[in-house]
Image (spheres, rainbow, N blue to C red):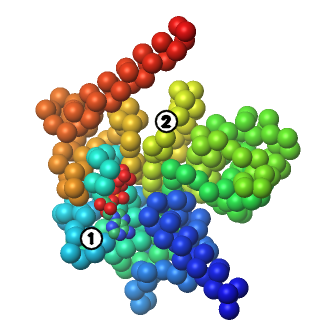
Amino acid sequence: IIQLYTPLNWFGTYYRAIQKNFVDMENMFDLLKENQEVIDAPGAGPLIVKRGVVEFNNVSFGYLPERMILKKVTFNVPEGKTLALVGPSGSGKSTIIRLLFRFYDVQTGSIIIDGQNVKTITQESLRRAIGVVPQDTVLFNNTIKYNVKYGRLSAEDVDVINAAKAADIHERILTFPDAYDTQVGERGLRLSGGEKQRVAIARTILKAPTIVLLDEATSALDTQTERNIQGALGEVCTNRTTIIVAHRLSTIIHADEILVLKEGEIVERGRHEYLVGQDGEYAKMWSDQLKNEKNAESVNESWQEE
Ligand code: ATP
């Protein structure tokens, strides 16, 4: 009995960890079909992806009925455009992403993709249309090739290599002991945070979804890694509808729309240049971030002087 229980518990725990932290959820869904809280509507058909237009109409949601987390959130991301979500910890950014993936159903309002309510389509087709670059990518204990290929298992080697090139990880892989055949993960070569993120980007490039969700890593990366990742992200977002949960405002200067969330409400919205010109939350966050960067620089300089 214990042996039977352990894996079930493990699934349960892991499932909750995925829901909570948005860790590589699309990968894990394959394993977790039995354990879904949300079920397909009877006779639900697949999402018919046309242009990748994402709409939230007056969405209100709480994990518990007595505590609403999102309040009347409305936005529209046109085909191929980029929406960024910013705001303090706990303001509801990741909740928006979880709802789009339909980990939970909304209490009121609706989430529409290309004119179809996510409640009425199969979850499998929804998740097939969306690619995710999570904060922390889980690697399989397998070769680096398999790990990239996971984005589309039927891919040819040449496509795997092209995706790795586009994600700026190919050169790095060639330095591994057995190149693409190198074992990675817990029992193999450990990859850095930046490398894992580029593996996730390569997977997403292979998957070629219509909609991409990015959960920017909170941990600071060094400038060169940051630059490589920005380039790779640019590659994966081009011509795709993109939603970014942003922690560094410098990465969303070019976003088509920025939503500033506070306690589950959109308190400001617009493009970067507009928002920095307002005397609001965003302008404050921006000047705080500049100050922090200056402080970090002067710390670095004083280090180098010693
Ligand atoms: P961060 O920047 O720290 O990731 P966030 O803006 O993404 O924060 P969310 O993760 O969306 O914030 O959380 C919004 C609120 O919902 C928080 O108050 C959080 O405590 C609550 N919350 C999140 N997940 C659950 C859950 N599974 N059950 C109950 N409350 C939850």
Point out residue 45 in the picture as x, y percentages from the top left corner. 45, 81
Residue type at mark 2: give it.
Ala
In the picture, measured across the screen, residue 70 lies left or right of residue 82, that is left
Q: Residue 276 is drawn in which quadrant?
A: top left
Residue 240 screen position, x and y as percent? 45, 50
Name the residue beneath numbered marker 1. Answer: 62
Assign the C terminus to one quadrant of the image. top right
Query: Gap in Å between the C-alphas at discs 1 and 2?
Result: 31 Å
Report ligand 1 position as a quadrant.
Answer: bottom left
Q: Are marks 1 and 2 in contact (CB under 8 Å)?
A: no
Decide if ligand 1 comes within 8 Å of the CB at mark 1: yes
The answer to whether 1 appears left or right of 194 in the picture is: right
Residue in the picture at 42% in, 71% down: 103
- Pointer 2 local density, CA inside 10 Å: few below 14, some 14–19, many at least 20: few
Residue 220's label in the rendered image is: 2
From this view, report whether residue 261 is shown above or below residue 64. Answer: above
Regarding mark 2 in the picture, which secondary structure is present there? loop
Please state the horizontal and vertical placement of residue 102, each as a whole percent of the image.
40, 71
Say which quarter of the image contains residue 271: top left
Along the line of sight, the residue nearer the viewer: 37 or 303: 303
- The residue drawn where x is 38% and y is 44% is 246
Decide: is 103 above or below 75.
below
